[in-house]
Image: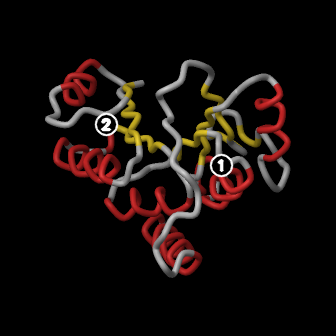
Amino acid sequence: ERALYRYRETEEILNMFPKKTRNAPIVDFFGKKGLICELKKASPSKGIINSSESLEDVILEYIQGGAERFSVLTEQNYFLGNWRFLYELKSKYPEKGFLRKDFLSTKEDIHESWLIGADAVLLIAEMLDNAQMKLLITGAHERGLQVLCEAHSDTELERILSLEELPDAVG
């Protein structure tokens, strides 16, 4: 089911960007001090958090509070996300920084993240081996995207820090 969802998502994104070019400028996601606010509709532990059709109401409150960087959940199955959330928010607020938070595992995921307007991507060490992390970090950096690697244990943190090319941040 996850593979089918990913295939459909890839097809939608590539159809939306037939020239395979990005419309939005890339923002230095980690270059500025300040809050990174999360935008999501739901979580497995809390259920529905935001029942509106878009995340526009939430981002407006964050912006009014001074936020300039946002982590957007695009994962559909567990977080009810959609890549269109990030695309629409970046289109409306091109000067703001957006991180794509999803279960990214392929170079195609990185390319799609770049196309839809992400300035940074999340990579989860628990679900990637060292070769995959290296490939995805390099692929992201080649596109001008920054990388946040997430570690849940000392072992995962050590794996991340032993990589030849390091992510821009570790969480």
In the rendered image of this protein, does residue 38 appear above or below residue 81? above
Residue placed under numbered mark 2 in the picture: 125
Instruction: Point out residue 154 in the picture as x, y percentages from the top left corner.
Output: 26, 18
Residues at discs 2 and 1 in contact (Cβ within 8 Å)? no
Residue 82 lies in quadrant = bottom right
Instruction: Point out residue 76 in the picture as x, y percentages from the top left corner.
Output: 60, 56
Q: Residues within 10 Å of mark 1 (few under 14, many from 20)?
A: some
108 or 140, nearer to the observer = 140
Rendered residue at 36%/34% (across/down): 149
In the rendered image of this protein, does residue 26 appear above or below residue 35? below
Residue 73 lies in quadrant = top right
Residue placed under numbered mark 1 in the picture: 94
Type of amino acid under label 1? Pro
Instruction: Point out residue 43 in the picture as x, y percentages from the top left corner.
Output: 64, 40
Q: Nearer the viewer, mark 2 or mark 1?
A: 1
Q: Secondary structure at mark 2?
A: helix
> Is 160 placed left or right of 76 in the picture?
left
Q: Earlier in the sequence, mark 2 or mark 1?
A: 1
> Is 137 placed left or right of 77 in the picture?
left
Residue 124 lies in quadrant = top left
Type of amino acid under label 2? Ala
43 or 105, nearer to the observer = 105
Instruction: Point out residue 103 in the picture as x, y percentages from the top left corner.
Output: 44, 49
